[in-house]
Amino acid sequence: MKILHVETGRHLYGGPQQVIYLAGALAERGYESILVCPPGSGIDNAARMAGIRVQNLFCAGDLDLPFAYRLTQYLRDLRPDIVHCHSRRGADMLGGMAASFADIPAVVSRRVDNAEMRLLAALRYRPFRKIIAISETIARVLREHDVDDDRIEVIRSAVDTEQLARPADCSKVRAEFAVPADACVVAAAGQLIPRKGHRYLLQAVADLRHRYPQLRLVIFGEGYLHNQLRAQAASLGLGGVVQFAGFRDDLDDFMSCIDIFAHPALAEGLGVATLKAAAAAVPVVGFAAGGLPEAVLDGATGLLVPPEDTDALALALAALIDDPGRRKALGAAGQDRMQKEFSIATMANRHVNLYETILNG
Protein backbone atom coordinates (compact mmCIF):
# COMPACT_ATOMS: atom_id res chain seq x y z
CA MET A 1 0.00 0.00 0.00
CA LYS A 2 1.24 3.46 -0.94
CA ILE A 3 -0.03 6.41 1.12
CA LEU A 4 0.51 10.03 0.17
CA HIS A 5 0.37 12.42 3.13
CA VAL A 6 -0.34 16.12 2.63
CA GLU A 7 0.81 18.46 5.42
CA THR A 8 1.09 22.16 4.58
CA GLY A 9 1.74 23.68 8.01
CA ARG A 10 4.79 25.92 8.38
CA HIS A 11 5.97 24.75 11.79
CA LEU A 12 6.68 21.41 13.42
CA TYR A 13 3.88 21.60 15.97
CA GLY A 14 1.84 18.68 17.28
CA GLY A 15 0.00 17.89 14.04
CA PRO A 16 3.07 17.57 11.80
CA GLN A 17 4.80 15.54 14.50
CA GLN A 18 1.91 13.07 14.32
CA VAL A 19 2.52 12.72 10.57
CA ILE A 20 6.17 11.82 11.25
CA TYR A 21 5.10 9.24 13.84
CA LEU A 22 2.53 7.73 11.48
CA ALA A 23 4.76 7.56 8.42
CA GLY A 24 7.55 5.95 10.42
CA ALA A 25 5.24 3.34 11.91
CA LEU A 26 3.71 2.59 8.51
CA ALA A 27 7.20 1.98 7.09
CA GLU A 28 7.88 -0.53 9.89
CA ARG A 29 4.73 -2.38 8.78
CA GLY A 30 5.84 -2.50 5.14
CA TYR A 31 3.73 0.38 3.80
CA GLU A 32 5.19 3.16 1.69
CA SER A 33 4.60 6.80 2.67
CA ILE A 34 5.27 9.90 0.60
CA LEU A 35 4.94 13.34 2.16
CA VAL A 36 3.88 16.46 0.27
CA CYS A 37 4.86 19.60 2.18
CA PRO A 38 6.09 23.14 1.51
CA PRO A 39 9.84 23.57 1.06
CA GLY A 40 11.59 24.79 4.19
CA SER A 41 8.65 23.96 6.46
CA GLY A 42 9.25 22.45 9.87
CA ILE A 43 8.16 18.99 8.77
CA ASP A 44 10.29 19.09 5.61
CA ASN A 45 13.64 18.65 7.34
CA ALA A 46 12.23 16.39 10.07
CA ALA A 47 10.75 14.00 7.50
CA ARG A 48 13.96 13.82 5.51
CA MET A 49 15.94 13.08 8.67
CA ALA A 50 13.45 10.31 9.45
CA GLY A 51 14.01 8.74 6.02
CA ILE A 52 10.57 9.66 4.68
CA ARG A 53 10.25 10.34 0.96
CA VAL A 54 9.38 14.03 0.46
CA GLN A 55 7.90 15.99 -2.44
CA ASN A 56 7.99 19.76 -1.94
CA LEU A 57 5.02 21.76 -3.23
CA PHE A 58 4.54 25.36 -2.09
CA CYS A 59 1.09 26.15 -0.67
CA ALA A 60 -0.06 29.67 0.20
CA GLY A 61 -3.30 28.58 1.89
CA ASP A 62 -6.89 27.62 1.12
CA LEU A 63 -7.12 29.88 -1.94
CA ASP A 64 -3.93 28.65 -3.62
CA LEU A 65 -5.59 26.93 -6.58
CA PRO A 66 -2.26 26.42 -8.40
CA PHE A 67 -1.26 24.19 -5.48
CA ALA A 68 -4.34 22.03 -6.11
CA TYR A 69 -3.40 21.81 -9.81
CA ARG A 70 0.24 20.84 -9.06
CA LEU A 71 -0.89 18.28 -6.49
CA THR A 72 -3.40 16.79 -8.94
CA GLN A 73 -0.67 16.34 -11.55
CA TYR A 74 1.64 14.74 -8.98
CA LEU A 75 -1.10 12.35 -7.85
CA ARG A 76 -1.82 11.30 -11.42
CA ASP A 77 1.87 10.52 -11.93
CA LEU A 78 2.42 8.79 -8.56
CA ARG A 79 -0.91 6.93 -8.31
CA PRO A 80 -0.92 6.30 -4.54
CA ASP A 81 -3.56 4.02 -3.06
CA ILE A 82 -4.71 6.57 -0.47
CA VAL A 83 -4.34 10.32 0.01
CA HIS A 84 -4.25 11.37 3.65
CA CYS A 85 -4.61 15.13 4.27
CA HIS A 86 -3.43 16.32 7.66
CA SER A 87 -3.70 20.08 8.11
CA ARG A 88 -6.18 22.90 7.68
CA ARG A 89 -4.00 25.40 5.83
CA GLY A 90 -4.73 24.34 2.27
CA ALA A 91 -4.19 20.64 2.79
CA ASP A 92 -7.75 19.66 3.52
CA MET A 93 -9.76 21.83 1.11
CA LEU A 94 -7.30 21.76 -1.77
CA GLY A 95 -5.89 18.31 -1.00
CA GLY A 96 -9.36 16.81 -1.10
CA MET A 97 -10.05 18.61 -4.35
CA ALA A 98 -6.85 17.27 -5.93
CA ALA A 99 -7.55 13.71 -4.78
CA SER A 100 -11.04 13.95 -6.27
CA PHE A 101 -9.70 15.22 -9.62
CA ALA A 102 -7.12 12.39 -9.66
CA ASP A 103 -9.80 9.84 -8.69
CA ILE A 104 -7.92 8.57 -5.62
CA PRO A 105 -9.70 7.80 -2.32
CA ALA A 106 -8.84 10.29 0.41
CA VAL A 107 -9.14 10.74 4.17
CA VAL A 108 -8.51 13.80 6.31
CA SER A 109 -7.45 14.27 9.92
CA ARG A 110 -9.15 16.98 11.95
CA ARG A 111 -7.20 18.14 15.01
CA VAL A 112 -9.10 21.24 16.16
CA ASP A 113 -12.40 21.55 18.00
CA ASN A 114 -13.48 24.98 16.76
CA ALA A 115 -16.80 25.38 14.98
CA GLU A 116 -17.23 26.40 11.35
CA MET A 117 -20.11 27.24 9.05
CA ARG A 118 -22.11 24.21 7.94
CA LEU A 119 -21.79 25.12 4.26
CA LEU A 120 -18.02 25.43 4.58
CA ALA A 121 -17.84 22.10 6.43
CA ALA A 122 -19.90 20.44 3.70
CA LEU A 123 -17.52 21.72 1.02
CA ARG A 124 -14.39 20.93 3.02
CA TYR A 125 -15.26 17.32 3.82
CA ARG A 126 -17.21 16.30 0.74
CA PRO A 127 -14.25 14.68 -1.13
CA PHE A 128 -13.20 12.47 1.79
CA ARG A 129 -14.26 8.89 2.43
CA LYS A 130 -13.48 9.30 6.14
CA ILE A 131 -12.83 12.21 8.49
CA ILE A 132 -10.45 11.19 11.27
CA ALA A 133 -11.16 13.01 14.54
CA ILE A 134 -8.37 12.90 17.11
CA SER A 135 -10.87 13.05 19.98
CA GLU A 136 -14.50 12.39 20.74
CA THR A 137 -14.89 16.13 21.30
CA ILE A 138 -13.90 16.84 17.71
CA ALA A 139 -16.18 14.04 16.49
CA ARG A 140 -19.06 15.70 18.30
CA VAL A 141 -18.29 19.05 16.66
CA LEU A 142 -18.33 17.35 13.26
CA ARG A 143 -21.70 15.75 13.96
CA GLU A 144 -23.09 19.11 15.07
CA HIS A 145 -22.09 20.47 11.66
CA ASP A 146 -24.01 17.76 9.81
CA VAL A 147 -21.11 15.47 8.94
CA ASP A 148 -22.54 11.94 8.68
CA ASP A 149 -21.60 9.82 11.66
CA ASP A 150 -20.61 6.86 9.48
CA ARG A 151 -17.92 9.01 7.84
CA ILE A 152 -16.29 9.91 11.17
CA GLU A 153 -13.53 7.76 12.66
CA VAL A 154 -11.98 8.60 16.05
CA ILE A 155 -8.25 7.84 16.16
CA ARG A 156 -6.49 9.64 18.99
CA SER A 157 -3.06 11.17 18.62
CA ALA A 158 -0.03 9.28 19.89
CA VAL A 159 3.20 9.99 21.70
CA ASP A 160 6.57 8.28 21.68
CA THR A 161 6.05 6.50 24.98
CA GLU A 162 9.45 4.79 24.87
CA GLN A 163 11.41 8.00 24.42
CA LEU A 164 9.42 9.89 27.05
CA ALA A 165 9.88 7.11 29.61
CA ARG A 166 13.68 7.21 29.36
CA PRO A 167 15.44 8.69 32.39
CA ALA A 168 17.05 12.11 32.00
CA ASP A 169 19.87 13.88 33.81
CA CYS A 170 17.61 16.22 35.77
CA SER A 171 20.42 17.90 37.67
CA LYS A 172 21.90 19.01 34.34
CA VAL A 173 18.48 20.16 33.10
CA ARG A 174 17.81 22.18 36.23
CA ALA A 175 21.23 23.77 35.98
CA GLU A 176 20.51 24.76 32.37
CA PHE A 177 17.35 26.56 33.43
CA ALA A 178 18.90 27.91 36.65
CA VAL A 179 16.30 26.11 38.75
CA PRO A 180 17.28 25.26 42.36
CA ALA A 181 17.53 21.57 43.15
CA ASP A 182 14.74 21.83 45.75
CA ALA A 183 12.36 23.81 43.51
CA CYS A 184 8.94 22.51 42.50
CA VAL A 185 8.95 23.05 38.75
CA VAL A 186 5.68 23.68 36.95
CA ALA A 187 5.97 23.78 33.15
CA ALA A 188 3.64 24.68 30.30
CA ALA A 189 4.20 24.12 26.59
CA GLY A 190 2.24 25.55 23.67
CA GLN A 191 1.90 28.49 21.36
CA LEU A 192 1.69 31.84 23.14
CA ILE A 193 -1.79 32.61 21.82
CA PRO A 194 -5.04 33.46 23.65
CA ARG A 195 -6.71 30.04 23.56
CA LYS A 196 -3.76 28.42 25.37
CA GLY A 197 -4.71 30.37 28.50
CA HIS A 198 -1.26 31.32 29.79
CA ARG A 199 -2.65 34.47 31.41
CA TYR A 200 -4.67 32.36 33.83
CA LEU A 201 -1.64 30.27 34.73
CA LEU A 202 0.44 33.37 35.45
CA GLN A 203 -2.25 34.70 37.77
CA ALA A 204 -2.54 31.35 39.57
CA VAL A 205 1.22 31.20 40.11
CA ALA A 206 1.20 34.79 41.37
CA ASP A 207 -1.44 33.81 43.93
CA LEU A 208 0.80 30.98 45.15
CA ARG A 209 4.27 32.52 45.05
CA HIS A 210 4.39 33.74 48.67
CA ARG A 211 3.02 30.48 50.07
CA TYR A 212 5.46 28.40 48.02
CA PRO A 213 8.81 30.19 47.63
CA GLN A 214 10.19 27.01 45.99
CA LEU A 215 7.71 27.31 43.10
CA ARG A 216 9.13 27.93 39.61
CA LEU A 217 7.24 28.19 36.32
CA VAL A 218 8.89 27.50 32.95
CA ILE A 219 6.87 28.34 29.85
CA PHE A 220 7.91 26.72 26.56
CA GLY A 221 6.63 28.08 23.27
CA GLU A 222 6.50 31.09 21.01
CA GLY A 223 3.70 33.30 19.75
CA TYR A 224 2.47 36.82 19.30
CA LEU A 225 1.48 37.16 22.98
CA HIS A 226 5.11 36.79 24.07
CA ASN A 227 5.66 40.43 25.04
CA GLN A 228 2.20 40.77 26.56
CA LEU A 229 2.68 37.73 28.78
CA ARG A 230 6.12 38.91 29.83
CA ALA A 231 4.60 42.23 30.79
CA GLN A 232 1.88 40.47 32.79
CA ALA A 233 4.48 38.37 34.62
CA ALA A 234 6.46 41.50 35.49
CA SER A 235 3.36 43.32 36.74
CA LEU A 236 2.55 40.35 38.98
CA GLY A 237 6.02 40.38 40.49
CA LEU A 238 7.02 37.04 38.95
CA GLY A 239 10.44 38.09 37.69
CA GLY A 240 12.27 35.50 39.79
CA VAL A 241 9.59 32.83 39.47
CA VAL A 242 8.68 32.62 35.77
CA GLN A 243 10.99 31.82 32.89
CA PHE A 244 10.02 32.09 29.21
CA ALA A 245 12.14 29.39 27.56
CA GLY A 246 10.96 29.70 23.94
CA PHE A 247 10.29 26.77 21.62
CA ARG A 248 12.36 23.65 22.35
CA ASP A 249 12.39 20.73 19.94
CA ASP A 250 14.11 18.60 22.59
CA LEU A 251 11.46 18.98 25.29
CA ASP A 252 10.63 15.26 25.10
CA ASP A 253 14.19 14.48 26.24
CA PHE A 254 13.73 16.14 29.63
CA MET A 255 9.95 16.22 30.17
CA SER A 256 10.39 13.76 33.05
CA CYS A 257 12.37 16.37 35.00
CA ILE A 258 9.22 18.49 35.46
CA ASP A 259 7.23 18.13 38.69
CA ILE A 260 3.84 19.33 37.39
CA PHE A 261 2.68 20.04 33.84
CA ALA A 262 0.13 22.85 33.52
CA HIS A 263 -2.18 23.14 30.52
CA PRO A 264 -4.72 25.95 30.98
CA ALA A 265 -6.03 25.85 27.40
CA LEU A 266 -9.54 27.17 26.78
CA ALA A 267 -9.99 25.13 23.58
CA GLU A 268 -8.06 22.03 22.58
CA GLY A 269 -8.58 19.20 20.15
CA LEU A 270 -6.89 16.70 22.46
CA GLY A 271 -3.78 18.25 24.01
CA VAL A 272 -0.73 16.32 22.77
CA ALA A 273 1.52 18.17 25.22
CA THR A 274 -0.47 16.68 28.09
CA LEU A 275 -0.11 13.21 26.56
CA LYS A 276 3.65 13.69 26.49
CA ALA A 277 3.72 14.82 30.09
CA ALA A 278 1.71 11.77 31.15
CA ALA A 279 3.98 9.46 29.17
CA ALA A 280 6.90 10.94 31.11
CA ALA A 281 5.08 10.18 34.40
CA VAL A 282 4.35 13.86 35.08
CA PRO A 283 0.92 14.74 36.55
CA VAL A 284 -1.14 17.30 34.63
CA VAL A 285 -3.17 20.22 35.93
CA GLY A 286 -5.42 22.04 33.47
CA PHE A 287 -8.83 23.26 32.44
CA ALA A 288 -11.57 20.76 31.56
CA ALA A 289 -11.95 22.19 28.05
CA GLY A 290 -12.23 20.59 24.61
CA GLY A 291 -10.58 17.19 24.43
CA LEU A 292 -8.57 17.60 27.64
CA PRO A 293 -10.87 15.28 29.67
CA GLU A 294 -9.95 12.53 27.17
CA ALA A 295 -6.23 13.19 27.58
CA VAL A 296 -6.28 13.67 31.35
CA LEU A 297 -8.43 11.58 33.66
CA ASP A 298 -9.41 13.92 36.49
CA GLY A 299 -8.29 12.51 39.82
CA ALA A 300 -6.53 9.56 38.18
CA THR A 301 -3.74 11.00 35.99
CA GLY A 302 -4.10 14.69 36.85
CA LEU A 303 -6.47 17.40 38.05
CA LEU A 304 -8.91 19.31 35.83
CA VAL A 305 -10.78 22.44 36.91
CA PRO A 306 -13.43 24.66 35.27
CA PRO A 307 -12.09 26.83 32.41
CA GLU A 308 -11.00 30.37 33.31
CA ASP A 309 -11.26 29.62 37.05
CA THR A 310 -7.92 30.96 38.26
CA ASP A 311 -8.68 30.22 41.91
CA ALA A 312 -9.46 26.58 41.16
CA LEU A 313 -6.31 26.31 39.05
CA ALA A 314 -4.23 27.65 41.93
CA LEU A 315 -5.86 25.23 44.37
CA ALA A 316 -5.13 22.27 42.08
CA LEU A 317 -1.49 23.30 41.74
CA ALA A 318 -1.22 23.76 45.50
CA ALA A 319 -2.70 20.31 46.13
CA LEU A 320 0.09 18.69 44.12
CA ILE A 321 2.86 20.96 45.40
CA ASP A 322 1.89 19.91 48.94
CA ASP A 323 1.77 16.19 48.16
CA PRO A 324 4.78 14.69 46.31
CA GLY A 325 3.36 11.21 46.87
CA ARG A 326 0.18 12.10 45.03
CA ARG A 327 2.20 13.63 42.20
CA LYS A 328 4.09 10.36 41.85
CA ALA A 329 0.91 8.26 41.90
CA LEU A 330 -0.87 10.39 39.30
CA GLY A 331 2.24 10.40 37.12
CA ALA A 332 2.61 6.63 37.27
CA ALA A 333 -1.05 6.12 36.38
CA GLY A 334 -0.75 8.53 33.46
CA GLN A 335 2.34 6.78 32.12
CA ASP A 336 0.65 3.39 32.29
CA ARG A 337 -2.39 4.73 30.44
CA MET A 338 -0.28 6.30 27.69
CA GLN A 339 1.61 3.06 27.09
CA LYS A 340 -1.64 1.10 26.81
CA GLU A 341 -3.84 3.53 24.87
CA PHE A 342 -1.77 6.27 23.22
CA SER A 343 1.28 4.53 21.79
CA ILE A 344 2.43 5.12 18.22
CA ALA A 345 1.82 1.44 17.47
CA THR A 346 -1.83 1.67 18.54
CA MET A 347 -2.39 4.81 16.47
CA ALA A 348 -0.69 3.34 13.39
CA ASN A 349 -2.59 0.05 13.56
CA ARG A 350 -5.90 1.90 13.62
CA HIS A 351 -4.90 3.93 10.56
CA VAL A 352 -3.89 0.76 8.69
CA ASN A 353 -7.25 -0.81 9.48
CA LEU A 354 -9.01 2.29 8.20
CA TYR A 355 -6.99 2.44 4.97
CA GLU A 356 -7.60 -1.25 4.27
CA THR A 357 -11.32 -0.89 4.96
CA ILE A 358 -11.54 1.92 2.40
CA LEU A 359 -9.54 0.06 -0.23
CA ASN A 360 -11.50 -3.13 0.29
CA GLY A 361 -14.81 -1.35 -0.03
Image (cartoon, rainbow, N blue to C red):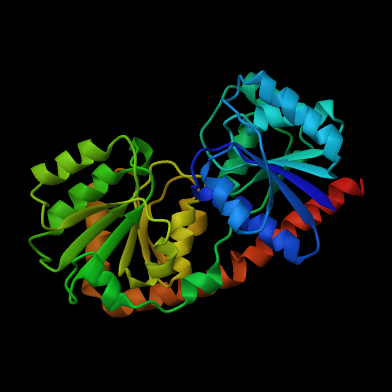
Does 223 appear above or below 356?
A: above
Residue at 74 percent of width and 34 percent of height: 148
Q: Quadrant of residue 67?
A: top right
Q: Nearer the viewer, residue 341 or 105?
A: 105
Residue furthest to the right in view is 360
User: Is residue 146 at all visible to an observer of this figure?
Assistant: no
Residue at 56 percent of width and 53 percent of height: 46
- Position of 137 with respect to 300 (left or right) is right
Residue at 92 percent of width and 49 percent of height: 360
Which quarter of the image is occupied by the C terminus?
top right
Q: Nearer the viewer, residue 98 or 318?
A: 98
Q: How many marks?
A: 0
Q: Quadrant of residue 151?
A: top right
- Position of 108 with respect to 304 (left or right) is right
Q: Position of residue 337 (x, y in %)?
A: 54, 70
Q: Position of residue 250 (x, y in %)?
A: 42, 61
User: Is residue 202 at all visible to an observer of this figure?
Assistant: yes
Q: Position of residue 353 (x, y in %)?
A: 80, 57
- Position of 302 with respect to 160 (left or right) is left
Q: Position of residue 213 (x, y in %)?
A: 10, 66
Residue at 60 percent of width and 66 percent of height: 343
